[in-house]
Amino acid sequence: MEEPTQPPTPPPQYVTLPHMQPPARRGMSAGAKWAIGCGVLIALTMFALVVLALTSMVGIIGAGARFGQLPGGNVALIRVEGAITAGAAGGGPFGEAASAERIVRQLQQAAEKDKVKAILVRINSPGGSAAGSQEIYQEIRRVRDQGKPVFASMGDVAASGGYYVASAAERIFADPGTVTGSIGVISANLELSGLFQKVGIKPQVVKEGEFKDMGSGLRPLTDKERALIQGLLANVYDQFVKAVADGRKLPEAQVRSLATGQVYTGEQALKLKLVDELGGLGPAVLAIGRRAGIRGKPEVVEYRRRSLMDVMFGDISTSKPHGWNGLLYDRVADLLTRGVLRTEE
């Protein structure tokens, strides 16, 4: 007799009770969004205030007074760094351009200080504005005419307008590997008419004056326009050559033979009499100190408005300040740079 077959056991059934279901997710409330937005706004405002505070400290440390000098010192160090411009633009909080107006003011202020016996111009510039270079050149010559020595010290590069400025100094120091020279003038413009034709662009120019759109790049130059530009460049070139010849006390023909736009190393420039001595900033400081009759080690005061990056991550280099001003300077400098403070040499 066969045993009855047992049917398979059905799998257990689970029933989810209403009170066991997870609560439905709800979107962020308007109040929470408003609170987060206000928090972000407050954080950005605080960050901006911190940046402004640090920038103000940069002004105190780097500017010291009206145009960027620090307390003390008998040799003024003035820097010409970056592209030379004829305007007052001095870069932003993270850098500094070689503004001719700023540099001229610094030269004037250093010349008026009785304690400052000499001025050292430190140049690290590939050039730039011809007019800006001329303004700095003329101010250096004026300071020298007043009886205060001015030397130039070249860094990585002092070419074109950078050399224009250096040639005004009484004596020029360069490192053997410094790139200098590049005595010449250039005008370069892109001529885009062929590209416009390919992409279907048709420039429309309305002008009064035959040469008003000359060099705009919308069309090729005519022979007459090319000759006009060449004449302008020749005039500025002659001014450049004469300024170098006068500053270096060299025959104009000799300078003109070197003024091909070619660059030279500091070692080559010494042989060509474009510089006077090989050496860095330290030897230049000692040399100008001797020239000014300073006994012992010169105290260098740097006329420079420090950038925010210099203060936060760089080196504050100047002569040691004195009195209450020096005490305040030391404390702020120590706070921002962990005490990195030494004489620039």
Image (tube, rainbow, N blue to C red):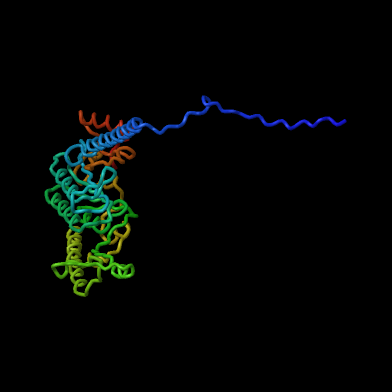
Q: Position of residue 266 (x, y in %)?
A: 31, 56
* Image quadrant where one finds the N terminus: top right
Q: Is residue 153 visible?
A: no
Q: Nearer the viewer, residue 297 or 2?
A: 2
> Position of 12 compared to 265: left or right?
right
Q: Residue at x 48, y 28 (%)?
A: 23
Q: Position of residue 227 (x, y in %)?
A: 20, 72
Whether 152 is drawn above or below 313: the answer is below
Give residue 334's quadrant in the image: top left
Q: Position of residue 333 (x, y in %)?
A: 28, 33
- Most distant residue in the top direction: 19
Give residue 267's quadrant in the image: bottom left
Q: Is residue 235 visible?
A: yes
- Most distant residue in the bottom direction: 223
> Position of 123 compared to 208: left or right?
right
- Most distant residue in the right direction: 1
Q: Residue at x 27, y 29 (%)?
A: 331
Q: Nearer the viewer, residue 219 or 169?
A: 219
Task: Count every numbered label the image shows and give the total.
Answer: 0
Give residue 126's quadrant in the image: bottom left
Q: Nearer the viewer, residue 295 or 16?
A: 16
* Image quadrant where one finds the C terminus: top left
Q: Residue at x 77, y 30 (%)?
A: 6
Q: Residue at x 27, y 60 (%)?
A: 181
Q: Nearer the viewer, residue 225 or 232?
A: 225
Q: Position of residue 323 (x, y in %)?
A: 20, 29
